[in-house]
């Protein structure tokens, strides 16, 4: 069975009930780099704590959409990854 490449979006997850936004302090990846699920891809800062953001996918980073130092809202797209993983929703949006 052939796996189809799909573009997945890495969004800023809510790390707590109160979290509505975070500052992207530093990218640990760049466009074109390979990432594995669970790799730390960025450092973010909320009003309470600085933390690492892990990649939810394994694949190749195609786009970084947020500059370091930017404040982003929960649910906002941070980056795009091209992956061979089967996405539960992938075929719906193709």
Image (cartoon, rainbow, N blue to C red):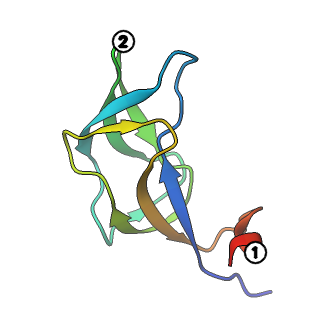
Question: In this rendering, is residue 65 above or below 23?
Answer: below
Q: Residue at x 69, y 72 (%)?
A: 93
Question: Does residue 58 appear left or right of residue 88 in this picture?
Answer: left
Q: Along the line of sight, which residue is nearer the eye, 50 or 33? A: 50
For label 2, the crowd category at 10 Å Cα-Cα, with few meaning under 14, some 14 to 19 and many 20 or more, is few
Q: Residues within 10 Å of mark 1 (few under 14, many from 20)?
A: few
Residue located farthest toward the left when viewing the structure as drawn: 69
Determine the secondary structure under disc 1.
helix
Instruction: Name the residue: 31% across, 36% down.
Output: 43
Tell me if residue 46 comes above or below residue 35 in the rendering: above
Say whether disc 2 or disc 1 marks the residue closer to the N-terminus: 2
Residue marked by disc 2: 48
Task: From the viewer's perspective, tell me whether residue 38 is left or right of residue 73.
Answer: right
The residue that appears at 77% across and 62% down in the rendered structure is: 88
Tag shown at residue 91: 1
Kindly state the secondary structure of the residue where label 2 is placed: loop
Residue drawn where x is 53% and y is 29% of the image:
14
Q: Farthest residue in the bottom direction?
A: 2
């Amino acid at each position: 069975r052939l796996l189809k490449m799909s573009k997945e979006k890495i969004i800023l997850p809510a790390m707590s009930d109160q979290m509505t936004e975070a500052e992207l302090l530093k990218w640990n990846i760049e466009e074109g780099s390979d990432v594995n699920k669970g790799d730390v891809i960025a450092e973010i800062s909320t009003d309470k704590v600085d933390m690492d953001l892990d990649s939810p996918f394994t694949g190749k980073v195609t786009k970084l959409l947020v500059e370091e130092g930017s404040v982003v809202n929960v649910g906002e797209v941070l980056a795009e990854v091209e992956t061979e993983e089967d996405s539960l929703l992938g075929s719906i949006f193709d």
